[in-house]
Amino acid sequence: MNATNRYAGEQILFITGRLAAPALQDMLEELRSEFDIQPVMQVMPITVAALMTPAWIARHLQMPEGCHRVVLPGYVDGDLDPIHQHCGVPVEIGPKDLKRLPEFFGGRRQTASLEDYDIEIIAEINHAPRLELACLIEQAESLRADGADVIDIGCQPGETWKGVKTTVAELVDLGFRVSIDSLNPQEIQAAVTGGAELVLSVNSSNRRAAADWGCEVVAIPDNACDWLQLAETVEFLAQKNVPLRIDPILEPIGTGFAASLGRYLEARRIWPDAAMMMGIGNLTELTDVDSAGVNLILLAICQELNVSSVLTTQVINWARTSVKECDIARRLVFAAQQQGVPPKNFDSRLVCLRDPRLVEMGNEHAQQLASDIRDHNYRLFVENGEILLMGGGKLWRDRDPFELFHQLLQFKPANLDAAHAFYLGYEMCKAATALQLGKQYVQDEALSWGYLTQPESSRRRLKRNSRTSH
């Protein structure tokens, strides 16, 4: 039993429709044992609980004696006062997904606030000299909205950008914090004069000018393996009282990645209190893999080594949302370190390709549910490697949505007009995608893509015409 559960000892009435009743019944048994509650279920005379309104529920509700509160399905919308007046006990809206009921009752592990973090995100705008000012500002605003703390202006090697001062000054006037990524002292000086607060690339080639810039710099080696030159640059800048961060340079996979990670460990050992930065784009941009998991691992390394800033970019398509991913990741790894536990069940927004968990009703429940649905509206599920289609007391199943639709046509359904066929095709496409990737499919809901999920418009549904079921 959860000792802190505020519902302990209560008799709680759960309202549902016929479609979800079997799954809810199984879940209530778990809640009974885990939270010391006395759950009671009332199945309303409606197939889909999402179609219920508070006024309709109040007309059909039968309150059991001694009930302490009522929990409604998460899709119920509107003023709950009619239900409260009818039953005289507290009425609450539960989660939209019934498998989250344990979390609703406090079963999920309590975690630190994900509002907190201590890693700064520096987001680079590549080839900035090639961009019109309006385009550059638009990119900067987008990066800041996704979580970037500093906008880095990436310059062109071998060139001197004459417009850098004006561009930086414009960004600073708009409230952006700006850094400059260049080895060119003339270019750097102009950017600093315009308001840049950080210079990303300082090595033996330009460190003598750094004392005149009056801002913080990032010390880097002349080449990735040149540990001696990095140490000399750090010592030189420290003697000149130039505020600095150290970046030993992360190498791409295949060109010394593991060894470069070791250099970050060694740098932290040699300079235990120094500020450090890691440029993570060498991994996300140069590896054929979705960037979210890579960013999380790199941010975790930074968190444990106290590397307080990361430089990222999002040029290649598979890394096009790296800044947002880093913003979520830095909160996860901070919370994990604060609690001393793995970042599991904290926040699933970076679980994009698959889902955190799958819930299936099982073959027995599926067969029973198909028998109970007597109307000729269609329900879709993904179960045990197949797509299930139910309606009119029948159950069709197959992995291939085309074959499934063919089975339906053999039944010669009278209600399958063009709009309904289009709707079923759309939903079967989602179901097939969920089946292929191992995702949870819920009819009329968007597939979950983590932080990339876009809710579906109600205009895509046919609930109020050919799918309405009472």
Image (cartoon, helix red, strand yellow):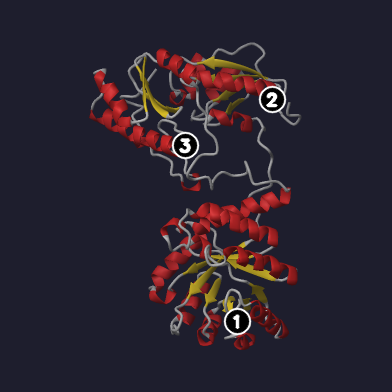
- Residue 324 at x, y percent in the picture: 52, 56
Residue located 63% across and 56% down the image: 300
Tag 3's secondary structure?
loop
Tag 1's secondary structure?
loop
Which badge, 1 or 2, comes first in the chain's sequence?
2
Residue located 30% across and 27% down the image: 403
Q: Which mark is residue 269?
A: none
- Residue 40 at x, y percent in the picture: 61, 16
Which one is nearer the viewer's eye here, 356 or 106?
A: 356
Residue 35, relative to residue 173: is it above or below?
above
Which badge, 1 or 3, comes first in the chain's sequence?
1
Q: Spatial distance from mark 2 to mark 3, Cα to Cα?
A: 28 Å
List the residue tagged with mark 2: 34
List the residue tagged with mark 3: 438
What amino acid does circle 3 point to?
Gly
List the residue tagged with mark 1: 203
Q: Spatial distance from mark 1 to mark 3, Cα to Cα?
A: 48 Å
Residue located 33% across and 29% down the image: 462
Q: Nearer the viewer, mark 2 or mark 3?
A: 3
Which one is nearer the viewer's eye here, 94 or 185?
A: 185
In the displayed structure, does residue 88 sit left or right of residue 241?
Answer: left
Q: Spatial distance from mark 1 to mark 2, Cα to Cα?
A: 60 Å
